[in-house]
Image (tube, rainbow, N blue to C red):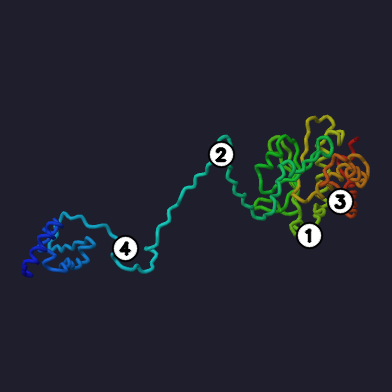
Amino acid sequence: MTTPTAMTQLSSAAAAAHYPCIELYPSSPLRQFPPPLTPVHTMRPLRERCGFNLQIKTSFSHSATPAPWSPKGHGHLQPHRNHLPRRRKTKRITFYDDESASPPQPTPAPAPVPPLVPAPVPVPAPEEQRHLQEVVPGLFFAFHTPADTTSNRALEAGYTHLVDVCLPTGPDAPFAGASEQAFEGTVHRLRLVLPAAALAPAGGRAGLALTDAQLRTARDFLAQALPYGTAAARGAAGVRVLLTTPPHRPTDAMAIAGCYLAFASGKGAETVLRYVDEEESFLSVWKGEVSGEEMERVERVARMWSWLSGIRR
């Protein structure tokens, strides 16, 4: 009769013969049943599972390159204009489908609008300012400029006789109402200085300011100078007389012309001046300047006695 110990050994031998891998176990499961469980491993630390290695350096070498600055290492940035991103000025490039087409031309800027100023008044030429007018062959009228001596000299060039009606101004001017005759080389000049009343400002038209004596002197001066005025001067040739008067005073000049022409022709002064007003070649500045009262003075002076009256005309 077999014992229990013998039975256990026979079972182990039979199991080893039937399960050859059972010898790999340290102890037969049949010897210890149920077999022991595999021991559970403890959980690894977080740094090992994440693959993170912590190194603490207690000394640093000088050759170490510092890491670039990063705003993340300085915490939250306060709002400031220096922390804003810089904007770059981009250059736009335009592409055209048609290579032959030229790019559009930039629109020109509008021209600046000039300020509203009055249009400049065109300055007339010196000849137009003078209003040079031929009354009869050899006798000319014009305006002179008192302050422009050079221009007056150029105007007087080419004349043999000069009648200068002037204002009583200037340090060397004769006294008012005077009449002077002088020879300046080959030129015979008669200067008639207007009375002081001519200096008074007039609101409109400047009337006749010459005295009767000055009108008579100018009449005889022209009658003696012009070749067709009297028989004594009929043989003279190349005589040119210029009568000048201040600007805006044509009445004095037309009064002298009417007095001389009435004396030389024997006709009335009104008839002579009416002919001048109707002549189309006359400038309008010389027309209609003698009034009715002034016409009577001119007619009276034209009929005064003269030593030239006895010479047959």
What residue lies at 64% left-to-right and 53% top-to-bottom?
113
Q: Is residue 142 above or below residue 169?
A: above
Q: Secondary structure at mark 3?
A: loop
Please tell me the numbered disc located at residue 290.
Answer: 3
Q: Nearer the viewer, residue 113 or 181?
A: 113
Please tell me the numbered disc located at residue 71.
Answer: 4
Which label sits in the foreground, 2 or 3?
2
Tell me which amino acid carries mark 1: Gly
3D distance between C-alphas at marks 2 and 3: 85 Å
Which label sits in the foreground, 3 or 1?
1
Pointer 3 with pointer 4, Cβ within 8 A = no
Tell me which amino acid carries mark 4: Pro
What residue lies at 72% left-to-right and 37% top-to-bottom?
187
Q: Quadrant of the N terminus?
A: bottom left
Q: Earlier in the sequence, mark 4 or mark 2?
A: 4
Q: Which residue is mark 1?
A: 203
Q: Nearer the viewer, residue 274 or 265?
A: 274
What residue lies at 74% left-to-right and 50% top-to-bottom?
193
Tell me which amino acid carries mark 3: Val
**Number of numbered discs:** 4
Please tell me the numbered disc located at residue 97.
Answer: 2
Q: Is residue 289 above or below residue 29?
A: above
Neighbours of disc 3 within 10 Å: few (<14), some (14-19), many (20+): many
3D distance between C-alphas at marks 3 and 1: 17 Å
Q: Secondary structure at mark 1?
A: loop
Which label sits in the foreground, 1 or 2?
2
Q: Earlier in the sequence, mark 3 or mark 1?
A: 1
3D distance between C-alphas at marks 1 and 2: 78 Å
Tell me which amino acid carries mark 2: Asp
Residue 270 percent across, percent down from the top left? 92, 47
Residue 167 percent across, percent down from the top left? 72, 52
